[in-house]
Image (cartoon, coloured by chain):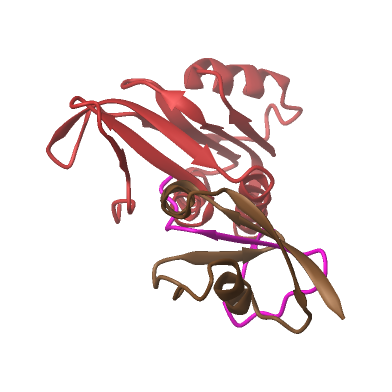
Chain colours: A brown, B red
Amino acid sequence: MFMSIKVRYFASLKERLGRSEQELVYSDGLTAGAVWLAATDGMELPRNILVAVNMDYASPDALVKDGDAVACFPPVTGG
Amino acid sequence: MSIVISQAIFDPWREVQAYQDELPIAGQYGATSVFVGTMRDFNQGDTVTGMNLDYYPGMTEKQLERIVAEAVLRWPVLETLVLHRVGDILPNEPIVLVAVWTAHRGDAFDACRHIMEELKTKAPFWKKELLASGDGRWVTANTAR
């Protein structure tokens, strides 16, 4: 089974990677952390980077499923 | 409970007044706590001439709704108003407004503080400062308080 995942990046991470989003088609059973690895050709997930799945904070160990949106971004600085 | 993300500049005091005028809770609230965050023209020893605020449309609103819902569960809150700017901001312009209406002052102070602190650590907004030199600089962390 293959699944399609949308990956989004924000703020300094978006600039660093040179892209704001990408579509990933991969075999299922991936964790959010594995999605990051696949999307960045094996770059280690920086320690300070936060992960969200479908707009909720998630652990890199969280399993993702077909159609999920994974977002990676630096610590938030609003307010 | 209103949450608004705004590109446009707003006057927090007029917003509080306008929102309060429309509330069907006149006579019930005895306390209103208001926090306004305003852009400074300095940070980390540098002059800052402007700022751009990035956010994650959809997730930002979702997290703010969760934060407000949590406050409503924890304190006897009658109403809340949360407004946050995104896009280009200039020094002295308001960035954020949190207003809380309750029967008594302790709950208003505590719920307002809670919403603001949670917003600071959980709502996906990111500030990029424009320095006097013309360079852009991402703010990497919020101050602890």
Farthest residue, direction front: A41
Q: Is residue B77 left or right of residue B49?
A: right
Q: Residue A69 appears in which quarter of the rendering?
A: bottom right
Q: Position of residue A8 (x, y in %)?
A: 61, 55
Pick the quarter of the image with the N terminus of chain A: bottom right
Q: Is residue B142 left or right of residue A76?
A: left
Q: Residue B2 appears in which quarter of the rendering?
A: top right
Residue at the spot x=69%, y=46% of the render? B58
The answer to whether residue B35 is visible is no
Q: Position of residue A6 (x, y in %)?
A: 71, 59
Tell me which secondary structure the magenta stretch mostly adopts.
Answer: loop
Q: Nearer the viewer, residue B2 or A55?
A: A55
Residue at the spot x=61%, y=47% of the render? B60
Q: Is residue B34 above or below residue A27?
A: above
Q: Which residues are magenta?
A: A55-79
Magenta-colored stretch includes residue A75: yes
Q: Residue A66 appears in which quarter of the rendering?
A: bottom right
Pick the quarter of the image with the C terminus of chain A: top left
- How many numbered discs? 0
Residue at the spot x=46%, y=35% of the render? B53
